[in-house]
Every structure is written in structure tokens, then in C-alpha cells.
Image (cartoon, helix red, strand yellow):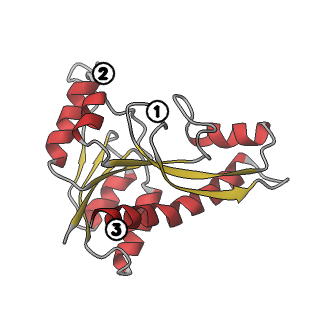
Amino acid sequence: MTFRLAILASGNGTDLSAIYEEMDAGKLPGVEISIVLSDREKAPVLEKARARGIRAEWVNPKNADGTVRDREEYDRELIDKIGTADLICLVGYMRILSQGFVRHFARQIINVHPALLPKYGGNGWYGMKVHEAVLANHEKESGMTIHYVDFGVDSGATILQEKVPVLEDDTPETLKARVQELEKKSYPEAIRRIMMERL
């Protein structure tokens, strides 16, 4: 049985590289990546996918006149390009999905967030902002959460959550690096868990 993934990413696709590694090692049997889509034309994740022979496309978020496209219209193009997929994986995808997209792929979309949700989640909480806030608030631990995507922002059901201690000499950069290591380990595991539930 083939379990087809569609990937939405905006940058390097660090967590996607971890998925590739697990696939190459035979630890994700049956998993196939059918398409990688990005909202950024020069996103490195696209070239990495093409190098593996995976269909990879940029979907322009702007109209021909340079204005920003309607979000629902943009996401309808994504839906058309994805076609059918068993799971949509957001890997550093910097756009908030429309209700139409979430409804179309209900309980088929997962995201990774660099915090222990519900802390430091919601609109505006992403990337380095999260790690800076964790340190500013003198938290004792941080981590990452892989969750289903629903109509809110970072509000879907948790699939997997892992923690790291916050060290006295941590900077936002060192904390980010340790959290990303958790993400790379956990994203393939989350896919495995979902596959097992559905088989």
C-alpha cells in the first residue's frame, strides 16, 4: 500500500530532509512524496526535491500586476496541484491556510511548531520569535509539537510533543538548533503513527 505525502514548504525544508533520510533507510515503507509545493520561487526545498526526481513547483502568491492573490483562490490552485494525498505535511510553510483548504483535506494536514503548544502558539508566533520569548520568560523547558491543522492557528490536536531543557547559556540560536533536532527525529515518527492508525 502506498501512503502519499504532499509537502508545503517555504524555505530549506530541514524537516523534509529528515523524512528523506528515513525513506532512504527503509524506515518509512510505503511512503511516497507525490509533490512539493512552495510559495517562494527560489526556495531551496524545491531544488532538493527535483534532485530526487520529485515533482516540485512554485505557486506564485501574487497576481500578474504584483498584487497579492486572494487566499482562497491561491489555495484552490494548491488543491488542484495536490490532487489526492493521504497526508499534507507543512514543513516551515509560512502561509496560513484558508478554511477551504483545511475543509478539503480535513484531518489530513499536519504541522510542526517550535514550542510546547499551547504555549507560544497562534498568529504571529513562528521561528526565532518563539525561542526569543522562551528565553525572555525564563522557561525551564521548550520543545516542539506536531499537530493536526484545523481552522485556527496552532490549535489542532497534538500528535506528538517532545521537550528539551532550556540551558543557562542558551541563545535563541542554540535553543533553535536543539529544537530542530527534535523536529527532525519526530516528524517521520508522526507520519509512522498516522500511517499505523489508518492501515
Cβ atoms under marks 1 and 3 closer than 8 Å: no
The C terminus: image quadrant = bottom left
Badge nearest the viewer, 1 or 3: 3
**Label 2 crowding class (10 Å Cα cut-off): few <14, some 14-19, many 20+?**
few
Q: Mark 1 points at which residue?
A: 153
Under circle 3, the secondary element is helix
Total labels: the figure holds 3
The N terminus: image quadrant = bottom left
Query: Which residue lies at the image location 67% right of the left edge and 43% below the top edge?
Result: 131
| Distance (Cα) linking label 1 and label 3 | 26 Å
Q: Name the residue under label 3.
A: 196
The kind of residue on which mark 3 rests is Met
Query: Which residue lies at the image location 81% right of the left edge and 42% below the top edge?
Result: 138
Badge nearest the viewer, 2 or 3: 3
1 versus 148 height, above or below: below
Badge nearest the viewer, 1 or 2: 1
Cβ atoms under marks 2 and 3 closer than 8 Å: no
Q: Which of pointers 1 and 2 lies earlier in the amino acid sequence?
A: 2
The kind of residue on which mark 1 rests is Val
Q: Mark 2 points at which residue?
A: 68
Under circle 1, the secondary element is loop
